[in-house]
Image: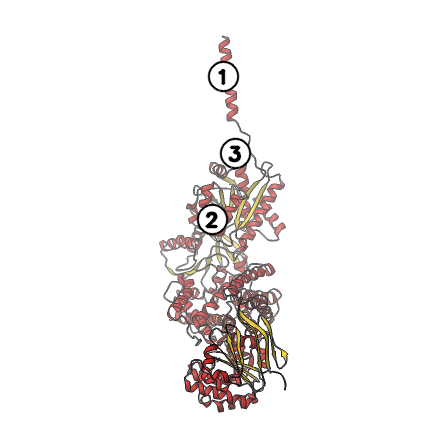
Amino acid sequence: MDLVIQLLLNGIVNGSHYALLGLGFGLIFATTRIVHFAFGSIFTFGAYVAWFVSGYMGAPIFLGLAAGVVVAMGLGVASYVGLYQPLERRGVSPLIPLIASLGLTIVLENLVGIIFGTGARTIDAETSIHFLGPAFFTSIHVWQVVSFLLVCVLLYLFVNYTRYGKAIMAMTDDPEMARVIGIDTARVSILVFALGSALSAIAALLVTLKDGASTHMGFTAVFMGFVAVIVGGVGSLRGAIAGGFLLGLVESLGLWKISTEWQSSIAFIVLFLMILLRPHGLFSLARR
Amino acid sequence: MVRKIIASVMAAGLLAFAGGASAQEKPNDPASYKFGAILAMSGKADWYGKVMSRAIQLAVDEINAKGGVDGIPLEAIIEDHKSGVAKEGVSAMNRLISIHKVQAVLTSFSPPTLAIAPIADEKGILLLNGGGTSAALLKASQNMFHNRTLASDLGLAAVKWAETRGLGDMAQMVWKNDAGESVAASAQPYWEKAGHKVVATEFVELGASNIDTQVAKVRVSNPSWVGLWLFSPESGLAIKKLREFGVKAPLIGIEYTGDIKEIAGSQVEGFEYASDYFTPSDEYPWSRDFAAAYKARYGEDPEFYAANYYENVYVLAEAIRRARAKGGDYWDGRKLISAIRENPVFDSVYGGSMTYQSNGVAKKRVAIFKVEEGKGKFVQYVSLD
Amino acid sequence: MTGPILETRGLSAGYGKKKAVQGIDLRLAHGETLLVLGHNGAGKTTLMRAIFGLLKPMSGEVFYDGHAITGRIPARNVAEGIAFVPQGHGIFPSLTVRDNLELGGFVDADTAKKKKRIEEIYGMFPILRDRAGQIAGTFSGGQKQMLAIGMALMHGPRVLILDEPSIGLAPNLVGRVMESIAEIKARFDASVIVVEQNIKYSLPIADRVMVLKTGGVIYEGDPAPLNDHARLVELF
């Protein structure tokens, strides 16, 4: 029983992290239909910039967070404006931006190593350890869940009550109709690339505080974000959240009685099952 | 009578001639002794590549500064297996052989080493391993020599230490690959034979970011101690998480690096580990001089990986020297290999000399260390017999 | 005001390297209803998309209210008063009726004006008021079309382009749609282009007709001659 409670707690904490990644990746994917693999290496950049400011230079953590978010947003917008948008304008098949994104990922990952050096990086932070009955968690875990909830609330308000938020929902539903009613879809694309990248930087800082940063952390991040979105249903932000939590819970509770030898396979198994049973994901939007 | 004299003169002449023929053929010298090194120059484990290549370069420069091997310089060609990708190791090996025509390769990491072993056998290349620790390496090639203690032996040292300390039930966290599993394969039976239980076995993928489940299961198993059959950086993460999740039992592992220390942070205090023990001492001047030279050039103290690869270059140089003494076409992997087999005793930078056993592994001393104030402090030697 | 409100000169557009329409001169006078007819593949939709900005023209020019808007993205055109109802239900299927209508008025920041406008549209299409909270994708074809037209009216367009508004609709609904177009013109003082294949119901509301065939104009002018069956056969 003790184990189940701990695993449940772990599942919620990690689920929050994956859900945040799913939201970031999903926002970009649903709105622009671009499979932005470089999301992962931008995530890594966000982590290293935050490390540089708060770890290396010793500035307070919120400054590291701000720096990471700003750099990530800049890189996200730059990848749209500099790479994907020109390809879009030429009317190429969707496969081309995907390949371009892979190339961008490699470039950015190597850049991180060149600029910040390779090798694990950590940020010293005062963390406290807490109990919930027999289960343990740290203050970073709490932050992961809290920041996810905060992001959810803000995103909800943004999407439902602001003009650009509604524009995002429109584009997610039908990009051409969005153009028809007068939405400048290029501007909205820039917005979601900025937002999605900002979310990845928040997740990246928390992971750096929790586990440390490494030059290849981005791959796991974009993979989990991608799986969360596919499992939850493309185009649905609620789906991305559900997908993320499903992944987090399966990775922990799913291994309750199964050997942890299967951990890396579990995410793939969930993905395959989803594709087989519900190809449109948990919350699929009605598509024309 | 004259015939007899002519016959004996002719006989003497023949003898002289024959004797001369069996005396040294002139050695067929290359312009330089090119050898390869396939290391983790990129990827998550690039720390290893960094220290190994530094040590290699230091040794090459030292030897060449003194005129090379019998006057011929050494040349190291460093290749990248991208933190242990077997395929990359094979490509690197092929490049080294076909483009640079090397006769010896310094290798690292079990997967690429296992992959290039058949190529080494086929082409007759000497392999010197100072890093990979999987037991599978032993059977992989007749052309390979190791100056690194096998992981399974490190694991054995760790459990022996646990026994010395009188510890009970063990939980183990195992790297999910050859190296990790070979450690578990030697530690677990020993511990069970000693009358204790293994209460949990949790697997950790290389590059894993989420090991919460494994840690939770270890904690719930309530072990007397935890065996960390993991390498850098995963063991650092395991140490941190185990302590954060409330595991207070002793943690005993098989390695300690800068990355492990970085990730584990303050939780690393008290971590114990078995390791090849390189320590410079005045008792062994070579060890002291190497450490000083390494520190002067790279600003860091060398640890045993650096010592092993530095040492391997000297082993190669000595093997070349011994083969060259026989003359002829001595710059050939097979000749180097037989030179080592004929005389397996080599000077060791650790101190004194080391002897390659019939299984190709040079027996070296393993020690137990305990981390105090972030540094590994020597506790005692462990005998593996 | 003199001069056409919307005009094209030598407009050519297509997909990839293929031209779907070539050298089109179109004129829409103020307050006029222009009916654009033609078979499938004649290039009607391509022409409308090229005018509105969903497709970049290959050559030629488009003028609105006297100034050039050739190749401009739709966002600018909508802001200046052009509305487009695309073929096959121009709505957002996963959003509610109310949300759809509000999005129709996206370019307008004036919330009070939009509220009034929504009331007007409910007046024209009462069913939309009854089902304001319903998800638009669950509507029938006819209801979706009414919503699509309602959306297009939200920002009070001066030019309204409808691409085959009667497609897939039952005859009584088609009549209703044509009636609403007449209503729109009266209420909003709009000029309208209707693209249609269904001649029977659309001809009566047209002030002028343009017939397209394989990318070119084969007839332009008064609708009356097309009532003559023989003439129709000749054209089509």
Decide which of tag 1 and tag 2 comes sooner along the chain.
1
Question: Where's residue B96, x and y in %?
Answer: 53, 45
Q: Is residue C119 visible from the viewing direction of this image? A: yes
Q: Considering only vertical position in the picture, is C205 above or below A70?
A: below
Decide which of tag 2 and tag 3 comes sooner along the chain.
2
Q: Are callouts 1 and 2 both on one chain? A: yes
Which colour style is shown? secondary structure
Mark 2 sits on what residue? B113
Q: Is residue B281 visible from the viewing direction of this image? A: no
Question: Where's residue A22, x and y in %?
Answer: 48, 71
Q: Tell me the SS state at disc 3.
A: loop
Q: Chain of mark 2?
A: B
State how far apart marks 1 and 2 are (Cα): 55 Å
Mark 3 sits on what residue? B329
Q: Which mark is residue B11?
A: 1
Q: Chain of mark 3?
A: B
